[in-house]
Amino acid sequence: MANIAYVDLDAVDDDIREFIEVARRTGTPRPEIQAVRAQQPDVLRAFVASWKVLFKGGIVDFHLKELLRMRVATSLECNY
């Protein structure tokens, strides 16, 4: 299995660092995967924008979305 290194937080823009810090504080999305996405800052920015709309917003309760996210990850044996 290939490994992708986490981004060096000292070498990224402030917004990227903040995205990862928010993930650390809230636990979602996982900070480890955010640190991988941060290797491509535009990818992380796009992900965060869609995450806010789809996961944090909408009509489905946040806690239900979180349970579903965890169920999918577990069923796929995802370590993140």
Image (cartoon, helix red, strand yellow):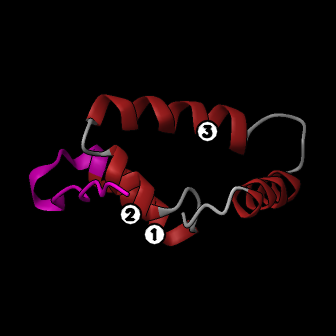
Task: Tell me whether the residue at label 1 lies in contact with that at label 2, contact meaning CB atoms closer than 8 angstroms.
Answer: yes
Q: Nearer the viewer, residue 52 or 75?
A: 75
Residue 23 horizontal side relative to residue 26, left or right: left
Decide whether residue 9 is among the magenta residues.
yes
The three-letter amino acid code for the residue at tag 3 is Lys
The alpha-carbon separation of the residues under discs 1 and 2 comes to 5 Å
The alpha-carbon separation of the residues under discs 3 and 1 comes to 16 Å
Disc on the earlier residue, 2 or 3 = 2
Quarter holding residue 46? top left
Decide whether residue 75 is among the magenta residues.
no
Quick one: quadrant of the C terminus? bottom right
The three-letter amino acid code for the residue at tag 1 is Arg
Quick one: quadrant of the N terminus? bottom left
Point out residue 79 in the picture as x, y percentages from the top left corner: 55, 67
Q: Is residue 50 above or below residue 69?
A: above
Residue position marked by numbered label 1 in the rendering: 24
Element on which disc 1 rests = helix
Residue position marked by numbered label 2 in the rendering: 21
Point out residue 59 in the picture as x, y percentages from the top left corner: 89, 36
